[in-house]
Image: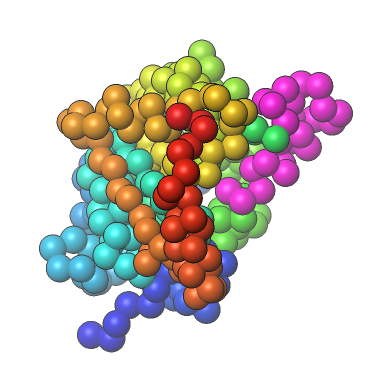
Amino acid sequence: MAEAQPIAESDEGSETSLSNQSSDRGATGAPKSRVSKRRRADGKDRNGGAKRRTTGSEDTLINTQKKLITPRSPTQAAYVEAMRKHDLVFGLGPAGTGKTYLAVAIAVSMLMEEAVERIILTRPAVEAGERLGFLPGALEEKVDPYMRPMYDALYDMMPGDRVLRRRDAGDIEVAPLAYMRGRTLSNACIILDEAQNTTPMQMKMFLTRMGENSRMVVTGDPSQVDLPAGSRSGLKDALEILDGVDDIKMIRFTADDVVRHPLVASIVRAYDRNDKPSTDGND
């Protein structure tokens, strides 16, 4: 069998496109039966025809409506496997390793298979101090600059008109972390991006939103905290507190997993070497 094509966050040429992808609704427009959705989400009986394996014991291919996505490194393969098996997964490491892109791919796949009823994508709007109510315009206009990377991933995997219809129907929600407070998020795949910029209180608030039949993926780079000096990162806090808890998996990426320009991996390594002697003021 030919070697599977690698995933790249912004390089469509490195991913195999799919055609004639089956619709997520029946001919009548009614939702399909939700029987055995968890089983399909775990990698059994997914859409897309014959199964192919890329890393031995686990099928790590991800079907989306536009592409067939495969991991590029063993760490990415372990990450995909973890997201299929565990209810809460932390993807940790430098930018360009595919941790957010792969998480969105899994979410889109689960939505297509009706393993979940909706996708919820969120991140802390640190640049705005999360005081979005003071900014002009409607909610969508306020949050768009902060959520754009997540929208980019969605549009890379789903036709634009389908993204808009799903969003208008409430099947896809992209919102700042502050808007998660007080909610119970059931039957959903929920992704928290840039989690290193949460406070411990925000992280606890987010993690306790999980409802029935939901999966959570938390992505972030503990070395790139943008919180005010002296503030502790909620991501670092959670990694210490939740270490060893059942059904929580932590996957750590390195510069070797970077899938952007080859120079990016060298840049990451250079910064890592420079940062080692110093202590992190955000601890």
Q: Is residue 85 left or right of residue 149?
A: left
Which residues lie in the magenta part? 128-150
Q: Is residue 154 left or right of residue 257?
A: right
Q: Position of residue 154 (x, y in %)?
A: 56, 53
Q: Position of residue 44 (x, y in %)?
A: 21, 55
Residue 241, quarter of picture: top left
Decide: is 41 above or below 260.
Answer: above
**Residue 143 counted in the magenta span:** yes
Q: Nearer the viewer, residue 105 or 97?
A: 97
Q: How is the image coloured?
A: rainbow
From where the camera sits, is residue 112 visible? no
Q: Position of residue 20 (x, y in %)?
A: 46, 70
Residue closest to the far bottom: 2
Residue 43, quarter of picture: bottom left
Q: Nearer the viewer, residue 167 or 156?
A: 156
Decide: is 118 above or below 153.
Answer: above
Q: Which residue is depicted at the point 59% across and 23% down? A: 178
Q: Looking at the magenta stretch, what is its main secondary structure?
A: helix
From where the camera sits, is residue 74 visible? yes
Quarter that holds the C terminus: top left
Q: Which residue is depicted at the point 65% across and 32% down? A: 126
Residue closest to the far front: 277
Q: Nearer the viewer, residue 220 or 103?
A: 220
Q: Is residue 15 left or right of residue 128?
A: left
Q: Which residue is depicted at the point 29% across and 42% down? A: 250
**Residue 149 counted in the magenta span:** yes
Q: Nearer the viewer, residue 208 or 227?
A: 227
Q: Which residue is depicted at the point 23% across and 85% down? A: 1
